[in-house]
Amino acid sequence: TQAAFEAAQRFKARTLLERMRGPRTASAPAPPPVSLAALEEDVLREREVLLDYFVGEDSSFLFAVSRRGTTVAELPGAAELSARIHLFRDLLATPAADAGARATEPIAMAGREIASLVLGSAAATLADVERIVSAPDGPLYDLPLDPLPISGADEPIGLRHVISRGPAATVLAQVRARARDRDSASTAFSGLALVGGGSGQGENAFLPRFYQDMKRWAF
């Protein structure tokens, strides 16, 4: 599990660097991946779970990490995830002719199916946590977790949990390490210096959507 997690973190760090600074970063060193032990013992807080995704062509993996340990769930590959997620988003965006319970049931059913699809056997880890830190990958960037129902109920996850998301577990670890020094907490996330530089502007325009959540990661 540890070896697979570190391999996924190295890939995510390299991908993030390339998006920030272009493919010419091939020779630039990526940050060392955070270990599961460090996440479980030091980085994560009580009643908090990290959902770190790695999406592959044929199969994908979710690492659900908390202070209690790590659960690994195998998920479908990129094509199936993308198709199912976009169908769900289209359903959410389509106004119902009837606002009654019969009209909302298809959405509730689809939400349960998507929750099962993207959480798999790791769904049980959300039962007694207050905060979810999500590090999506691939088509999962297009899926908001908030409207998905909690396992065994139709209540949306967002009503019970504080949800934030960002690029990767290694970024979370570095943001929080820097934020321990209160004097540097305000700059712990800025510029993503924690992963080798970049300003979050221009080529890095995809990053600003994470900045507010990364501030929340720090504290």
Image (cartoon, helix red, strand yellow):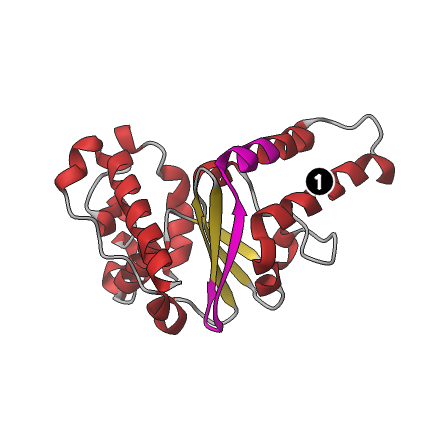
Crowding around mark 1 (Cα neighbors within 10 Å: few <14, some 14 to 19, many 20+) is: many
Q: Residue at x 58, y 52 (%)?
A: 119
Closer to us: 54 or 203: 54
Which quarter of the figure is the N terminus placed in?
A: bottom left
Q: Residue at x 64, y 50 (%)?
A: 116
Tell me the kind of residue under disc 1.
Ala
Q: Is residue 72 magenta?
A: yes
Does 205 sit left or right of 165 as displayed? left
Where is residue 45? Give x, y as percent: 44, 69
Where is residue 218? Give x, y as percent: 36, 59
Does 85 sit left or right of 140 as displayed? right
According to the picture, the residue beneath numbered tag 1 turns out to be 110
Where is residue 147? Give x, y as percent: 64, 45
Tell me if residue 138 comes above or below residue 53 in the rendering.
above
Asked whether residue 148 is in view, the answer is yes
Q: Residue at x 47, y 39 (%)?
A: 58
Q: Secondary structure at mark 1?
A: helix
Does 153 sit left or right of 124 as displayed? right
The picture quadrant where one finds residue 57 is top left
Does 95 sit left or right of 42 as displayed? right
Q: Is residue 3 magenta?
A: no
Magenta-drawn segment: 65-84
Which quarter of the figure is the C terminus placed in?
A: bottom left
Q: Count up the numbered dots.
A: 1
